[in-house]
Image (cartoon, rainbow, N blue to C red):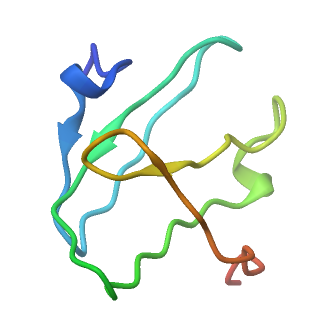
């Protein structure tokens, strides 16, 4: 639900939730948050076939203090 461009406006997700949306211009940002614990594994998937109008969006993960969290190498899209 817009607006969700900043951490203060972030929509809440739970494990197992799916999110679908459109990024309508190059500076659009959609921000979400979830409660996780050290050791949890999170998968974020998107396939270029769904982004025919441009490149796939960038995904970044931050801790509660807004420090970046390292991400593993992306996997290929599931068929």
From the top left corner, tell me how far across and down residue 31 is, in percent.
37, 33
Name the residue at 30% across, 22% down.
4
Name the residue at 70% across, 49% down.
50
**Number of marks:** 0
From the top left corner, tell me how far across and down residue 7 is, in percent.
29, 27
Q: Examine the rendered structure and indicate whether residue 3 appears above or below residue 65.
A: above
Pick whichever, 5 or 25, lies toward us. Answer: 5
Q: Examine the rendered structure and indicate whether residue 12 appears above or below residue 8.
A: below
Q: Does 52 sit left or right of 24 as displayed?
A: right
Q: In which quarter of the image is the C terminus?
A: bottom right
From the top left corner, tell me how far across and down residue 70 is, in percent.
59, 65
Q: Examine the rendered structure and indicate whether residue 46 appears above or below residue 66.
A: below
Q: Examine the rendered structure and indicate whether residue 21 appears above or below residue 16.
A: above
Q: Does 54 sit left or right of 77 as displayed?
A: right
Pick whichever, 76 or 78, lies toward us. Answer: 76
Pick whichever, 49 or 40, lies toward us. Answer: 40
Name the residue at 79% across, 55% down.
49
Classify residue 30 by image quadrant. top left
Q: Quadrant of the N terminus?
A: top left
């Amino acid at each position: 639900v817009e607006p969700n461009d900043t951490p203060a406006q972030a929509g809440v997700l739970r494990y197992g939730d799916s999110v679908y949306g459109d990024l309508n211009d190059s500076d659009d940002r959609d921000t979400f948050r979830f409660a996780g614990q050290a050791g949890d594994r999170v998968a974020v998937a998107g396939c270029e076939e769904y982004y025919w109008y441009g490149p796939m969006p960038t995904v970044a993960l931050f801790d509660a203090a807004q420090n970046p969290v390292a991400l593993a190498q992306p996997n290929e899209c599931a068929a």
